[in-house]
Amino acid sequence: MQNNLFSIEHISKVFSDGTVAINDVSLELQKNQVYVIIGPSGSGKSTLLRTLNLMEKPTSGHIYKDGQDITAKSYPIEKHRERVGMVFQNFNLFPHMTVLENINSAQMHVLNRDYKNATEVSLGLLEQVGLLEKKNHYPNQLSGGQKQRIAIARALSMHPEVMLFDEPTSALDPEMIGEVLSVMKNLVHSGMTMIVVTHEMGFAKAFADEIIVMDQGKVIEQGTPEVIFNQPKEQRTAAFLKSVL
Ligand code: ADP
Ligand code: MG
């Protein structure tokens, strides 16, 4: 399929302690789409996301990107991670670097951009997330919402093909959630392919092309927000939505 980004074929992930985090999941993820993954805690959402940038390797099954098996031994993991941006619940900024240095870092060390070019890109991204005036601040001088906007800018600095978000607003005080969602909404409008794990059902309803519901390591159903919110097939989906809405 021409517009396919990831073809996930029967992947499972069993951790060394025997925990089955993903249990035979298959999914087709298309380019320029927004996917929202929902489901109870422990259902395998983070693990699934992490297999897509190869932070975790499936124990069995295959993931294809542009027809190439990214789970194959010979696949260049580092190159892959450059193309797949990831944003975490806890920001993961470098504490000893300024905002500008945080955003410059991967561009200079991974893409070999020089300082001038990297800084030009970084300043453009800082403007995009509304934090140009914070460029010389350190992460501990920023609010949680500002840190997360910087983390998004840093991921975007690599010009990724797809952005993965793992509960990007879960660690934030309520009054800061909106500013992060607003940056994410702008990304949706720019056509970015996004795979978002979140409990923000307002975002899911308004921006997801497709919602993927997980429970106990399995995808139990998937569909448009309209279908998932109004006529879920699975009782477990209805129960989960009731618990978060
Ligand atoms: P979610 O993001 O939906 O909360 P996770 O993908 O984090 O779920 O976890 C799925 C299951 O795998 C849980 O039972 C969790 O405890 C377990 N798990 C996650 N990471 C590890 C690990 N590194 N070692 C062992 N078990 C893990
Ligand atoms: Mg998680």
Image (cartoon, rainbow, N blue to C red):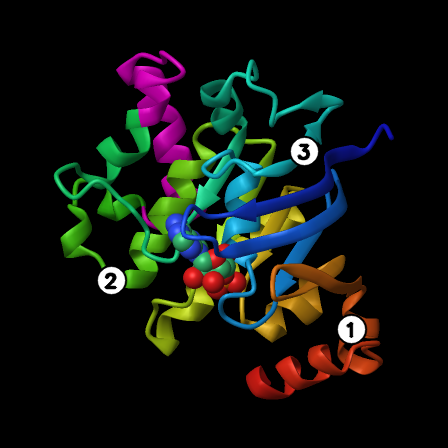
Q: Main secondary structure of the magenta part?
A: helix
Tell me the kind of residue under disc 1.
Ile
Q: Position of residue 127 (x, y in %)?
A: 39, 43
Q: Please give the range of residues in magenta.
A: 106-131
Q: How many marks?
A: 3
Q: Position of residue 192 (x, y in %)?
A: 63, 41
Callouts 3 and 2 close, C-beta under 8 Å? no
Say if residue 137 shows up in the picture: yes
Q: What residue is pinned by disc 2?
A: 143
Determine whether 141 is above or below 127 in the image: below
The structure residue drawn at horizontal position 12% and vertical position 39%, both measured from the top left corner, is 96
Q: Position of residue 160 (x, y in %)?
A: 54, 31
The C terminus: image quadrant: bottom right
Find ligand 1 in the image and state its quadrant.
bottom left
Image-quadrant location for residue 51: top right
Tell me the kind of residue under disc 3.
Ile
Q: Residues within 10 Å of mark 2 (few under 14, many from 20)?
A: few
- State which tag comes first along the sequence, 2 or 1: 2
- State which tag comes first along the sequence, 3 or 2: 3
User: Assess mark 2: CB under 8 A from ligand 2?
Assistant: no
Q: In the image, is residue 124 part of the stretch drawn in magenta?
A: yes
Foreground residue among 183 and 66: 66
Label disc, if present, on residue 228 of the rendered structure: 1
Label disc, if present, on residue 63 of the rendered structure: 3
- C-alpha span from label 2 to label 1: 34 Å
Foreground residue among 15 and 94: 15
